[in-house]
Image: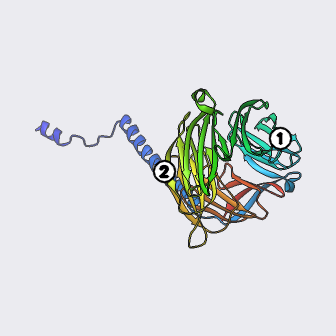
Amino acid sequence: MKDIMSDGNDGEGQTDSPDEQIRQHRKRAARKTVIVCVTVLVVVTALLLLIQLQTYTNVRTIDTYTIAEAADSNYRQFADGVLKYSRDGISYLNQNGEEQWNQAYQIKNPFVVTNTTSAAVADKGGNDIIVFREEGVKGEIHTTLPIQKITVSEQGIVCALLKQENMSKIICYDMAGNVLVEHKASAEGMGYPLGVSISPNGEVVQVLYLYTRDGNITSKVVYYNFAEAGEDQTDHQVAYEEYENTIIAEGFFMSQNVSAAAGDNCLLIYKGNDVPKETVKVELKKEIKSVFHSDKYIGLVLKNTGKGGYELRLYDMAGKQILSEEFSGDYGNVKMCGNQVIMYDGARCCIFTRRGTCKFQGEADNTILEIFPISGINKYIMMNTNGMEHIRIVK
């Protein structure tokens, strides 16, 4: 009888052990922490989507940095700052408008080419080229023939297209001005060279030729390898393609392995480190207004047919179309910064994201001479006739 009563009262009045209480407390605390973290993550994600998916229409100036002779200069984004250049010289400004270095010169028609590590300024129709990096000027080059176009590798090797009466010369220089390679191109032979581009390592050169005979037009995309892979080839030529009834005038390297060329009715993508080969040909039925690129994407602004406005397209390096958006307005400057396509003309500006969201469409207070994003939500550096402004795009 005693045993039965004892069994019936089993567990009555008992409490959890201290270890069990601690374990349960920790479980409840962990559950609360997970709930708080998930809630914060949802809120932050919603805020980021709200920021990224809406269109802003106004500009708010955060800081202004006055720059001497700002209205008489041109600007180009380079490295983490801005190049300021004119007929009298070039300088490099940091993001606070402070001059890091400057180089005086006398160049009648200056134009600048850049990549991630090196840049060069040249005198179009003249004979002077200056090569520099973020830390300063690295060399000066003097050509014997007038300069038509130049391109620069990441190491600072300059490939120049020089004009001669009956033929053109393509000459590669090191930063000290020494001739590395010299190639002659006659209109009667290969054709008239329209464009030249050099690979990041400075070994492969892409040249675009236009050849005409009996009223027929043919474009030629030719690659020269001036390293070991081209030593046994005639004129170091390692790749050659012809395109009839097409004018191809824009070419560039996106990486050492990927290059591209754009014509009036097609986009061509080539792959190969030493011997590039065409891998993609995109037929275009609209007229190209602008071509631009980053190290990941190729961008086109196409004129709409049968209606007004334009189409913005982006292709990846495999030739896959990843964006198609229509917009109105005529913008003379188009470029890609990270995942943003920035278009501007005068005081007007339009910005699209890589996913197709129109991030900004509006006007600044002054003529925009250069604009690019910096760290911070919706923050940009804008160069204008007053100097440098840090701005934020707002509703």
| Residue 352 in the image, given as x and y percentages of width and height | 60, 59
206 lies left or right of 140:
left
Q: Tag on residue 110?
A: none
Can residue 159 be seen at all in this image of the molecule?
A: no
Nearer to the camera, 379 or 232: 232
Residue at the (59%, 40%) spot, across then down: 255
Instruction: Give above or below for 252 relative to 325.
Output: above
Mark 1 and mark 2 in contact (Cβ < 8 Å)? Answer: no
96 lies left or right of 217:
right
Q: Going from the N terminus, do you reach mark 2 or mark 1 first?
A: 2
Considering the image in quadrants, where does the C terminus appear?
A: bottom right
Nearer to the camera, 80 or 7: 80
Nearer to the camera, 142 or 378: 142
| Residue 130 in the image, given as x and y percentages of width and height | 80, 39
Question: Most extreme residue toward the left, as rendered?
Answer: 1
Can residue 175 be seen at all in this image of the molecule?
A: yes
Considering the image in quadrants, where does the N terminus appear?
A: top left
Kindly identify which residue carries mark 2. 36
Kindly identify which residue carries mark 1. 128
| Residue 98 in the image, given as x and y percentages of width and height | 83, 44
The image quadrant that residue 350 belongs to is bottom right
Please, what secondary structure does the residue beneath circle 1 have?
strand
Question: Most extreme residue toward the bottom, as rendered?
Answer: 307
Residue type, numbered disc 2? Val
